[in-house]
Amino acid sequence: MTGGGAGPRTAQGPGGDAGPRAAEGTTLVPTPEHVELANSVRSLLAKHSDSRAVRRALEQPHGFDVDLWAMLCHQIGAPALPIRQEHGGAGFTLAEAHVILEELGHALAPSPLLSSLVATAAADDESLPRIAEGAVATLAWSGVTGPTDSPIGVTWSGDVLCGTIDPVLVGDVADIVLVAARHGARGEDVGLFRVDPSERGLTRTRCSGMDPTLGFATLELDSVPATPITLDAADVLTAAHRVGTLATAALQVGCAQRGLDMTVAYTKEREQFGRPIGSFQALKHRMSDMLVRVRMSRSGAWAAVQAHVHDAPDADVLVAAASSYCSEAAMAVAAETIQMHGGIAITWEHDAHLVLKRAQALQQLFGRPQDHRSALIS
């Protein structure tokens, strides 16, 4: 029994084998370039985001390590990957960002990459070059913590925004703030607007949450001037929701892999009755179930992001299926991680509780598993 998974964390692909390639050019396994990217990010995180570094980052004013974020931006080019070159980006796809997110999920590293990727899918031409350079961006929209038809509590009238929205990913420290708001005579239309974070009338308050590695804030807008990006944002927000769903699935895969790796390592060291507990058949079965969940999650998430990248006709189905499975698999693996570590798992010094908190928090983003299953059958 080993804790190492397939996919970007090794040279193997999702499911643990080399795998074929799809007829239409979609890559069913990570390419050598993806593996090399994963190795680079993993090496960087091993040096700058170990357990102690994660806890230090939580105490910083931004809630994440700004130096690590700068390295991810300048050495890896993380936020620039899915942005087209004409907007200052690297011209790659969400698949490359997916590789990085999985490594961040495994390291449990606090990072604004998730928020910036979601904002990228909705950002205007003026914001994209700044995001590519490393400016932290966020999309203030109720769909971030729900389905696409979640109620919107902000209105736009007379060129100003009024209302409250929470929680907003890294909303208290974001350099670029995009806000979804209702407008029109009956408030039935939804638009997208850019707000200067320094505007008077905008109050940003950090929220406390279950997972300290994911930063959230409440945004209160009291007649805040806003620049319209589009007054018909339905398609833009749907696209941003899909990007967020895929990005969250990548983080969930990494989180589940971390829980599995920790559990396997612990059961090799912890002894009962004169032998490692990992040699007990019952625990082997439970860890095998964890491994199956991790590998199935990785396979589903990778298939979904590839379908998105190649605009496959079944992309919506694969995204919904992957999100539903990855979300529940991460929770199941996290729960087993806690159980199989015993009492040490709930101490602050051990990382097992961070795995559980991360899995629980991610499950609340971009629709719950049941929301995605409802979408599949409807």
Image: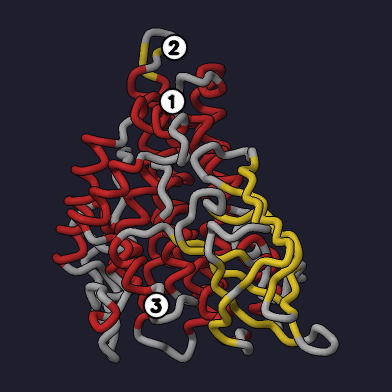
Give the structural element (helix, strand or loop) at label 3. loop
> Is mark 1 in CB contact (under 8 Å) with mark 3?
no
Q: Nearer the viewer, mark 3 or mark 2?
A: 3
Q: Residue at coordinates 53% horizontally, 59% vertically from top-left?
A: 197
Which amino acid lies under the numbered mark 3 shown in the image of this protein? Glu
* Image coordinates for residue 31, horizontal then vertical, percent: 19, 69
Could you say which disc has been placed on residue 126 in the image? Answer: 3
Q: Nearer the viewer, mark 1 or mark 2?
A: 2
Spatial separation of the CA atoms under disc 1 and disc 2? 10 Å
> Is mark 1 in CB contact (under 8 Å) with mark 2?
yes
Residue lying farthest front? 200
Give the structural element (helix, strand or loop) at label 1. loop
Q: Residue at coordinates 49% horizontally, 38% vertically from top-left?
A: 355
Which amino acid lies under the numbered mark 2 shown in the image of this protein? Gln
Which amino acid lies under the numbered mark 1 shown in the image of this protein? Phe
Q: Considering the image in quadrants, where does the C terminus appear?
A: bottom right
Graded by Cα atoms within 10 Å as few (under 14), some (14 to 19) or many (20 or more), the crowding at tag 1 reads: few
Name the foreground residue: 17 vs 275: 17
* Image coordinates for residue 202, horizontal then vertical, percent: 64, 57
In the depicted structure, whether residue 22 falls above or below residue 193: below
Give the structural element (helix, strand or loop) at label 2. strand
Residue under numbered circle 2: 272
> Is mark 3 in CB contact (under 8 Å) with mark 2?
no
Spatial separation of the CA atoms under disc 3 and disc 2? 61 Å
- Please tell me which of labels 1 and 3 falls first in the chain: 3
Q: Quadrant of residue 304?
A: bottom left
Residue under numbered circle 1: 280
